[in-house]
Image: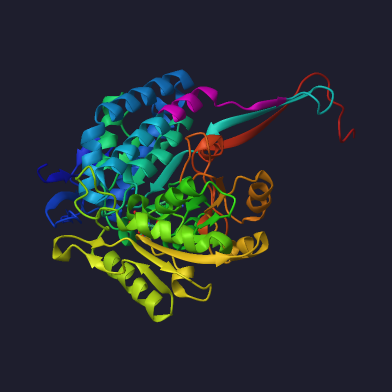
Amino acid sequence: MSTRSYHHFIGGEVVDGAGRGAIERRSPAGGRLVARYAEGTPDDIDLAVEAARAAFEQGPWPRMSGLQRAEVLNRLADLIRDNRERLARIEVEEVGKPIRFARGDIDGAVGLTRYAASLAMQMAGSVYTNIGAGKTALLTREAVGVVALVTPWNFPALILSQKVPFALAAGCAVVLKPSEFTSGSAFEIAALAAEAGLPAGVFNVVSGYGATVGDHLTAHPGIDFVSFTGSTRTGSRVVANTSRHLVKSSVELGGKSANIVFADADLEAAVDGALMGVFFNNGECCVSGSRLFVQSSIADDFIAKVVERSRRLKVGDPFDEDTDIGALIDEQHLAKVAGLVRTGIEEGAELALGGKVAGGSAGHFHEATIFDRVEPGMTIFREEIFGPVLSVTRFETVEDAVRLANDTAYGLSNYVWSKNIDTVLTVAKRLKSGWVQANTVIDGAPQLPLTGVKGSGFGYEMGQAGFEEFTQLKTLLIHTGPRAPVFPV
Ligand code: NAD
């Protein structure tokens, strides 16, 4: 593909914006210039918020029936599906993820958009008739208004689709700030939404850096709700921004999830789950099962199998259909991952596989890496590495497994492998995370909400709960018939 150039998309128009510069995106897998995104300024954000406000207050979108909004969203889903290969290749170029996972992301985006279309039809409130004679209360559900959406670089099209169609289904108007590393698919999907019939100004995209446009957007007084996905550090900054104007927010942040394997699990499936848990999407995945806990009685054999299969993973060109691990997002991130691997060695974890930067200067590749005998005091047990690095810790009892899994500042997801339903439920109930999955890993469906606890944030994404984030309940209490005076003077 040739180098793509993107300008802001504001009020239904492609606009140059106030900024003069462009952000150059080089492929993490070889350095080729793959895209340029307009470098936004606070003025561009102001324009986009203004356009969204006008579309929300005066435009047709929030006033359309759920059926009409669903029709537009279903057309958008069709267009994303029809452009599957093109969008997947954009994700590969900009993110460095293997092509087969990028295609999965686009399929996920289609599914999320179709599900959001169905929610547009189901947006409803409730009625109370049991609150006293002559009284009826209507709880109506309304669009929350103009929403600011900020997304990270690891799943650009997919995470966008966990937010944008849900906001649109509710009747909101959107200003999206995608990651400065991977803004291409946001502009592509905004253009497809316009082609699907979305009115001008309902879906605006401004590209640029987080510290300038992201910060200005999330602190903007013209915004009614902020939905953010990214690191815990940025998330707390975003919450500080929204609290200035008492704006509601949802923040989906980092993770350090446990993947717990009991001796009575289907061990073949659990070995595959261990690999999927940490090597999916190059390990650049918020719900990655980066801490593997294995029950001692099976640990030696199980870990040997995980190491043996991981050794066969192919690291390299993300466009190669056989590649399992592509390039990390950029040089700084690769250096961070490599630095944490060095720290793991220095702090005494046992390196069982990999441990090195791979591929020379042609790209930001890192070998599949596994550390055994990782202790809770070690840095690699605690920090989100966000790369293809697994830490393995052995445990004896259910009690140990729960204590170790919960020994983290994060609380996004956890995984349990056991054929014993008693073990699964006992452990699942005690894990402190928004998501628990048993005998599967990094699984999901548009109907299932994602949320974090502790340092992984708050608020919901996807599912009915994720949709309701973009709505506001209004209580309408109506009195009919004679009303006894309260001050009969
Ligand atoms: P990041 O926090 O660096 O950036 C995320 C987004 O925030 C980007 O668009 C960035 O430009 C913007 N941003 C940066 N500074 C900002 C500011 N001051 N105000 C407003 N916006 C600002 O995160 P990242 O490196 O892009 O993504 C990786 C992180 O995201 C990891 O920690 C990962 O776990 C997390 N993540 C979480 C989920 C989830 O659902 N919980 C999903 C994917 C990624």
Q: Main secondary structure of the magenta part?
A: helix
Q: Is residue 403 left or right of residue 314?
A: right
Query: What's the colour scheme?
Result: rainbow
Q: Which residues are magenta?
A: 114-127
* Vertical order, 392 against 439 (above or below): below
Residue found farthest to the right = 489
Q: Quadrant of the C terminus?
A: top right
Question: As drawn, is 143 to the left or to the right of 32?
Answer: right
Q: Quadrant of the N terminus?
A: top left
Quadrant location of residue 160? top left
Would residue 49 be visible to someone looking at this image? no
Q: Nearer the viewer, residue 108 or 176?
A: 108
Question: Where residue 470 appears, x then y in whole percent?
Answer: 50, 38
Q: Position of residue 349 (x, y in %)?
A: 43, 75
Q: Would residue 123 be counted in the magenta stretch?
A: yes
Measuring 29% from the left and 65% from the top, which residue is drawn there? 333
Indicate left or right for 127 with 9 as reference.
Answer: right
Instruction: Please say if 44 is above or below 61.
Output: below
